[in-house]
Each structure stands twice: as structure tokens, then as C-alpha cells.
Amino acid sequence: TNNTKNLLKIEPYRSAYAKAAKNLLAVRTPSSYMAIHLDVLNSFATSEESLLRMMQFETDPLGALYGMRAYVEEYARAKHDITLLVDVVKQTSLVFTENDPAYGLLAYLTKTR
């Protein structure tokens, strides 16, 4: 549409990644699952940063293109990492309460996989 104001529609998704990363960071994780936990956490942080770069197209077009590429690449990695995390949660019968920082995220992920 040649209207860079449409890039503001990305903000809710960027914000969701930021919130998910913050909540996941607050989850206490057994050392045996730390690698998967960190991979998902890093993926959310990378996705947030990529979306932020995309939103800055008007002032930094090259950075926005880099952000778009990084987001697409991260999506494939994240999909794999999230699948592993959900499998661990289900296989170990981990239970989260509504007071746990990532309760909503993990409840959503385990229901949709």
C-alpha cells in the first residue's frame, strides 16, 4: 500500500513476544530442560527484535529487511524448539498453576499441539 503506518499493526505481535519472553524467563526450570528453555526464550527475544526492526522501515529500510529475514529464519527454529518444549511438558506431566509466570503461554502451547 506504500503506507508505512501499516507497519504499526505489527506492534501487538512484537509486544506478545516481549511478554512471552519475560514470562518464560521467570519460570524456574530444571537443569535437564534448561537448553530447550533457553532456546525458546532466545527465539522469542529474536522474534521481538526482528519485528521491531521491521516496524522501523521508514527510518532504516536495510535494518527492516534484515529484521524480516531474521524473523522468517527464526520462525522455523522456534517451531522446532516449541515442539520440543511442549513434548517435554507433556511427557513429564508437568503441571502449572495460574500463578506461574508462563501459565497462559504454556497452557496455550500444550492445547494447540
Image (tube, grey):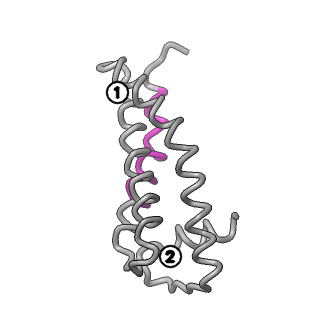
Residue displayed at 53% across by 51% down:
78
State the residue in front, 50 or 59. Answer: 50
Residue displayed at 41% across by 50% down:
15
| Sequence order check, earlier mark of 2 and 1 | 1
Assign a secondary structure to mark 1. loop
Residue displayed at 53% across by 47% down:
77
How much space separates mark 2 and mark 1, taking CA atoms?
A: 32 Å
Q: Are marks 2 and 1 in contact (CB under 8 Å)?
A: no
On the image, numbered disc 2 is attached to which residue? 103
Residue 88: percent from the left, percent from the top?
A: 58, 74
Q: Amino acid at mark 1?
A: Gln
Q: Looking at the rendering, in which quadrant would you find the C terminus?
A: bottom right
Q: Magenta part mainly helix, strand or loop?
A: helix
Find out whether residue 44 is within the magenta segment: no
Callout 2: 10 Å neighbours few (<14), some, many (20+)? some
Q: How many numbered badges does the structure rendering display?
A: 2
Q: Amino acid at mark 2?
A: Tyr
Residue 3: percent from the left, percent from the top?
A: 47, 17
**Numbered range of the magenta stretch:** 6-20
State the residue in front, 7 or 74. Answer: 74
State the residue in front, 56 or 106. Answer: 106
Residue 24: percent from the left, percent from the top?
A: 41, 67
Q: Quadrant of residue 23?
A: bottom left
On the image, numbered disc 1 is attached to which residue? 56
**Vertical placement of 57 versus 11: above or below?**
above
- Per the rendering, the mark at residue 100 is none
